[in-house]
Image (cartoon, helix red, strand yellow):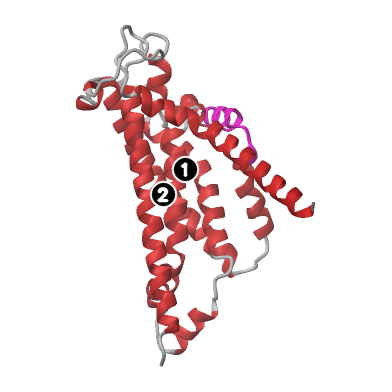
Amino acid sequence: MNSLRSRIARTGLNVFAGIGLVYLFMPIFFIVLFSFNKPKGNFNIVWQEFTFDNWLSPFSQPSLTSALWTSLQISAVATVISTIFGSMIALALSRRSFKGSGVINLLLVLPLTTPEIVLGSSLATLFLGQTFVSFGFVTIVIAHVMFQVSFVALTVRARIRGFDWTLENAAADLGATPWRTFRLVTFPLVLPGVLAAALLAFALSIDDFIITFFNSGTTVTFPLQIYGAARVRIPPQINVLASLVLFASVALLVIGTVRGQRVQAARASGRKRPK
């Protein structure tokens, strides 16, 4: 009887997990599916006919292409800045216990718990009070860095939580300078966490709408362009470009996962190798 209950419980759990995954991935499935649709009007929301024409001309809509390129530029710049600052904050909080570290931890969590509309409007109010700042590319980058830093810092800190800091002492005992120790010992070990945090920050930046909406000015990003176009026309190229971004993200994730598995396998074989 207990064995039967256990099997029923496992089956039920798997079923609910499968339903949850289907619910999460259904919008993504429809985005990819409707990138192959041939609509008969201005709105690509009803399936009509299968075609490859959309993929043969993904950049036929200049406004969409320009908006996507702007989003990629903003995300790249904001990700580089936030990754550097967030990683430095994570290393500082993990290596040393100092007065005020609790306040910093609280400040890191605040952007994650604050509603985006509050954060976006607050930043807009801040920029409005500065006569030398005009809304546009720079204000969007600053706004994105504000919330990206928290995600990067917390992600990197979780990765290095179990880091053995005595390795740095060992390198110093062997005559390595602080910079050489960081470059050859610390950084390679925390690099997977830094890359994961950078990918997360990039995805959050290119996807952001609310904070960008408040601080964009005349600059139009890909989400803003889709929002504006949806009231007049939804061309299938929107689905094509979104699918391209999705496939690129999945490819990067697969490459990173495979590379990490190979590195772990190489380390494991090195530990098992007889001396």
In the picture provided, is 130 more to the left or to the right than 68?
Answer: right
Which comes before the other along the chain, label 2 or label 1?
2
- Are the two marked residues, 2 and 1, in contact with CB atoms closer than 8 angstroms? yes
In the picture provided, is 202 more to the left or to the right than 129?
Answer: left
Residue drawn at (41%, 78%) of the image: 269
Residue drawn at (57%, 59%) of the image: 158
The kind of secondary structure the magenta stretch mainly shows is helix
Q: What residue does disc 2 label? A: 81
Query: Is 114 contained in the magenta span?
Result: yes
Q: What segment is highlighted magenta in the picture?
A: 113-125
Please provide percent x and percent y for residue 180. 37, 77
Q: Does residue 256 sit above or below 74 in this rendering? A: below
Please provide percent x and percent y for residue 80. 38, 49
Is any atom of residue 220 visible in this view? no
In the picture provided, is 13 more to the left or to the right than 224?
Answer: right
Q: Quadrant of the C terminus?
A: bottom left
Q: Residues within 10 Å of mark 1 (few under 14, many from 20)?
A: many
Q: What residue does disc 1 label? A: 145
Q: Considering the numbered disc 2 on the image, is that residue within a helix, a strand or a loop?
A: helix
In the displayed orientation, state which residue is furthest to the bottom. 275
Q: Residues within 10 Å of mark 2 (few under 14, many from 20)?
A: some
Residue drawn at (58%, 33%) of the image: 119
| Amino acid beneath label 2 | Ile
Q: Nearer the viewer, residue 156 or 273?
A: 273
Q: Does residue 99 sit above or below 76 in this rendering? A: below
* Disc number for residue 197: none
